Amino acid sequence: MALLKLIDLHTFFDTKKGTVKAVNGVSYSVDAGKTLGVVGESGSGKSVSAMSILRLLDGNGRIDSGEILFDGQNLVEAPMEEMLKIRGNDISVIFQEPMTSLNPVFTIERQISEAFLIHQDISKKEAAKQSVEMLRAVKIPNPENVAKQYPHQLSGGMRQRVMIAMALACRPKLLIADEPTTALDVTIQAQILKLMNELKKEQGTSILFITHDLGVINEMADDVAVMYCGQVVEMAPVRMIFGGSIYSHPYTEGLLTSIPRLDTPHGVRLEAIPGSVPHPLDLPEGCKFAPRCKYATAQCVSREPDLVQMEPDHWVRCYYAEKEKRWAKQKDTDSPAQSQIAGR
Ligand SMILES: Nc1ncnc2c1ncn2[C@@H]1O[C@H](COP(=O)(O)OP(=O)(O)OP(=O)(O)O)[C@@H](O)[C@H]1O
């Protein structure tokens, strides 16, 4: 069952040069207790769609249309007092750089305690005790000592563990993790991802995991939404994305062939997706990916495809994938003799 559902969300920024359509009709959902990985190149609207959920947009930003259903409530219409209650209590967030979210002049214990005190009716002493327990839960060694320290005294990995402790302090239903391990080195990244997976299982938290790294998606996600130019171009369970479905979006295909794999034979060059992401103020008319797509036809350039269901749980925004599907269907209904005549 979906805990969070974005329906045709449009989030725009008004700038001197025009309207930046950062999120341009995004629909995705996060099931209870599951992780949705949102992946895409820089500028594809991953963070803006997530910040729209919390209604934490820059001053020039606005949700133009669409719905954000969280636990049945449309957050687009929720009063600000309600949003203040939801943030940190029902929905928590962790970012790439913990130093921007941690206050350098307060101890770790005080900062985690604050999360408890804002949302729960408990004493300061009890909050301090629970803070140490949270540090233990995120596997920080010597939690009693670390609780007394200041953020600058901790390593990057430890600070990110503290952020996770703060984010999970009130047992939120949804955790938004926006590139939480990008700034960390590979070993620490693996430890943090493992920790998040363990906590998700223990607490039943749903996770919206934002990254530009398909390798991380493979580790973390149950379902995947691939974003390009403010839109979801493909959505499917993780095994379908990595299983090489014949209905894959060409952009997903490009992302997959551009990641290094252990079984890539020596000397084989990884393929980069040609071209670059269009400027948000100058988006193409038809399919936003058409200028970089090797399968693009006149139809792709002139008219935008819809997000179409290709098979159960698998949605793709692409005429080429639709054609593949029609062809596969045709193959199924054709007799073998007819297939031979058709030359297939
Ligand atoms: N305040 C703003 N004013 C104008 N444009 C903005 C503003 N904030 C974000 N944008 C634009 O919205 C688009 C989507 O940005 P967003 O941060 O969601 O991308 P992203 O996919 O999360 O990228 P990254 O991986 O680099 O964080 C970008 O083109 C960005 O420049």
Image: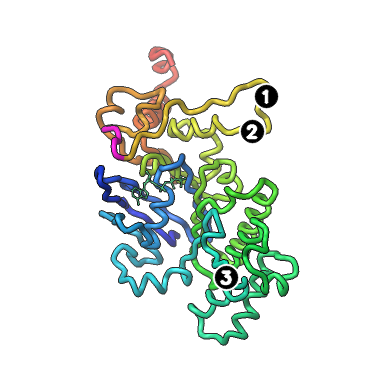
Q: Left or right: where does residue 118 sit relative to residue 310?
A: right
Dividing the image into 4 quarters, which one contains the N terminus?
A: bottom left
Q: Quadrant of residue 274?
A: top left
Label number found at residue 243: none
Coordinates of residue 178 in the picture (x, y in percent): 50, 53
The residue at which mark 3 appears reads as 105
Distance from disc 3 to disc 1, alpha carbons, whole Å, reads 51 Å
Q: Position of residue 94 (x, y in %)?
A: 52, 59
- Eyeballing the image, is 151 above or below 301? below
Residue projecting furthest to the front: 105
Return the x and y of residue 146 as percentages of the image width and height.
69, 70
Q: Quick check: is the Cβ at mark 1 less than 8 Å away from ligand 1?
A: no
Is 11 rendered above or below residue 262?
below
Can you name the residue that lies furthest to the right here? 142
Magenta stretch contains residue 106: no
Residue 203 lies left or right of residue 265; in this view the side is left
Dot placed on the residue nearer the N-terminal end, 3 or 1: 3
Q: Which residue is mark 2?
A: 261
User: In the image, residue 46 lies at what x, y percent?
Assistant: 43, 48
What numbered label is drawn on residue 265?
A: 1
The kind of residue on which mark 3 rests is Val
Quadrant of the image for the C terminus?
top left
The region drawn magenta spans 281-285
User: Which one is earlier in the sequence, the residue at label 2 or at label 3?
Assistant: 3
Mark 3 Cα shell of 10 Å, populated few (<14), some (14-19), many (≥20)? few
Q: Nearer the viewer, residue 340 or 38?
A: 38
* Residue 55 position (above or below residue 110): above
User: Does residue 314 appear anywhere in the picture?
Assistant: no
